[in-house]
Image (cartoon, grey):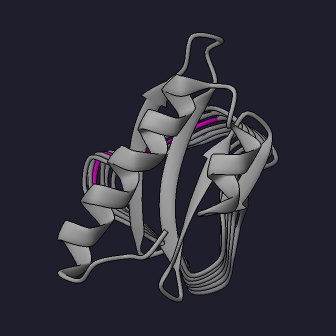
Amino acid sequence: ARIGDDVQIGDYAQIGIGARIGDDAQIGDDAQIGDGAQIGSYAWIGSYARIGDDAQIGIGAHIGDGARIGDDAQIGDDAQIGNGAQIGNGTWLGDDAHIGNGARIGDGARFVLNLGADLRGYTLHAYAVDGVLRITGDGADIALPEAREYWADNPWMLAACDYAERLYAIATAKPHDC
């Protein structure tokens, strides 16, 4: 492993073979950094967080306590990953991404959008895997159009589905039949 200058590593943290940690990064107690993982300078990895093998964490990113970042995932600069969030293997999150506490983002996601919180405080996210747009939140992880049926009695959630669909169509430059 290569550890940069002024890195703080908490008690019982585990650093994998070939991992690289940039200058001024902070690794929390009992955190696990996988083999070949790269942690950017000024990144903050919370206690009990797990960073998968060959994952890349950007400069200044904040990974919350107990979060799980999958193998080969790429987390952009200044991204904020909430406590207990689970980010799947091979997922890409861009710079400044904000993923809420306890959110689940599936393997291979390439488009991730924070849709905000509903009136009950559930944070919603939209992401795409293999061209299928999915909505996660309120304890669910559902592909469209099933999400519309699941949340049929909640106008706010239905509006969030519509918003995610429109942005996905723009981001992928093709219409997405929902």
* Residue 86 lies in quadrant: bottom right
Q: Residue 141: where, in percent of width, then height?
A: 73, 55
Q: Nearer the viewer, residue 124 or 163?
A: 163
Q: Nearer the viewer, residue 12 or 46?
A: 46
The residue depicted at 60 percent of the width and 37 percent of the height is 64
Q: Residue 104: where, in percent of width, then height?
A: 69, 52
- Left or right: 30 as drawn, with respect to 2: right
Q: Nearer the viewer, residue 34 or 4?
A: 34
Q: Is residue 10 above or below residue 3?
A: above
What secondary structure characterizes most of the magenta part? loop
The residue depicted at 23 percent of the width and 83 percent of the height is 174
From where the camera sits, is residue 156 visible? yes
From where the camera sits, is residue 68 visible? no
Chain part drawn in magenta? 59-64
Q: Is residue 69 magenta?
A: no
- Left or right: 35 as drawn, with respect to 78: right
* Quadrant location, the N terminus: bottom right
Q: Residue 83: where, in percent of width, then height?
A: 66, 33
* Residue 142 lies in quadrant: bottom right
The residue depicted at 17 percent of the width and 81 percent of the height is 173
Q: Is residue 61 magenta?
A: yes
Q: Nearer the viewer, residue 84 or 47?
A: 84
Q: Is residue 167 above or below residue 96?
A: below
Q: How many marks?
A: 0
